Image (cartoon, coloured by chain):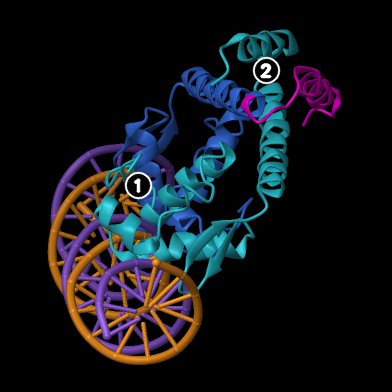
Chain colours: A cyan, B blue, C purple, D orange
Amino acid sequence: MWFRVDYHSGVPIYEQIKERIKEAILKGEFDDSNPVPSVRELAKALGVNVNTVVRAYREFEMEGFLRAQPGVGYFVGDVERLREKILCDKLQQLSLLLKELRDLGFSKEDALRILEDAWRGEVR
Amino acid sequence: MWFRVDYHSGVPIYEQIKERIKEAILKGEFDDSNPVPSVRELAKALGVNVNTVVRAYREFEMEGFLRAQPGVGYFVGDVERLREKILCDKLQQLSLLLKELRDLGFSKEDALRILEDAWRGEVR
DNA sequence: TCACTGTTATATCTGTTATAATACAGTTGG
DNA sequence: CCAACTGTATTATAACAGATATAACAGTGA
């Protein structure tokens, strides 16, 4: 498997799985020749219980980003919608965070400098 | 009391207390004539157990933002250090968030617009 | 048929959160 | 001194979430 779970991070395992699967979907790492791992396969590879993977996948399915096909497997849903949802969430976070910084006395000019730095860094 | 705990938010009560006390300290609402409420007083006012308030105060003390004086009460610690620590944490969040937005294909120009909006809004 | 797939259910263990009830010791003002 | 506050400590209990173990059932496809 391309990642490991961290038992000491305080973050629930099923949340970690959702996060990693989400990243992989966004990077377009899944297709017909390289499908989402089955619940048993992923559980075995990560050394966790099947139910834990099931929970992660089912929550993801309810959010519309995975489709379950009983007897066959899980498949990626609407990637573009996933991207838009994440973008929307992060924009809200950004707006909130900036207001907090402003209230803490942070200057707009310094915030601008951090923004420039972010776009200066290399793209993954 | 100037706030209430939310039993249905999923956020532990002691965390809610820490957050509210932190905000009050930052706003300079505590001094000799208006000290931090005693553990029993706050517990009674919020309708929660003393131990829950104790946990909140003790964790805050270990972070250096409250000083316990047995027999007397709790007092605010180094407010400026608290402000700096929070600022540092939020700047890290900002940097991370901006890089994520960039990787999601968000444009620097749109980010700039959100930044302008944040500093345009009213100050608390 | 066989070996996969997802689905469902039950029971159990663990750690965290919160409560309740005491008890002890330090501080302060009358 | 004493009463009424403070913080501190301990023990027991309950509730809940997270994760596990185990098992069974049904759909798919080579």
Q: Position of residue B46 (x, y in %)?
A: 53, 60
Q: Which residues are magenta?
A: B103-124
Q: Position of residue B40 (x, y in %)?
A: 41, 56
Dot 2 surroundings within 10 Å: few (below 14), some, or many (20 or more)?
Answer: few
Q: Quadrant of the N terminus of chain A?
A: top left
Residue B9 is covered by the magenta coloring: no
What residue is rendered at 60% in x and 65% in y?
Answer: A62
Of B123 and A117, nearer the camera is A117
**Is residue B47 at all visible to an observer of this figure?**
no
Left or right: where C20 falls relative to A118: left
- Distance, label 2 to label 1, CA atoms, is 32 Å
Left or right: where D2 falls relative to B2: left
- Tell me the element at label 2: loop
Of B83 and A117, nearer the camera is A117
Q: Which residue is mark 1?
A: A10
**Is residue A11 at all visible to an observer of this figure?**
yes
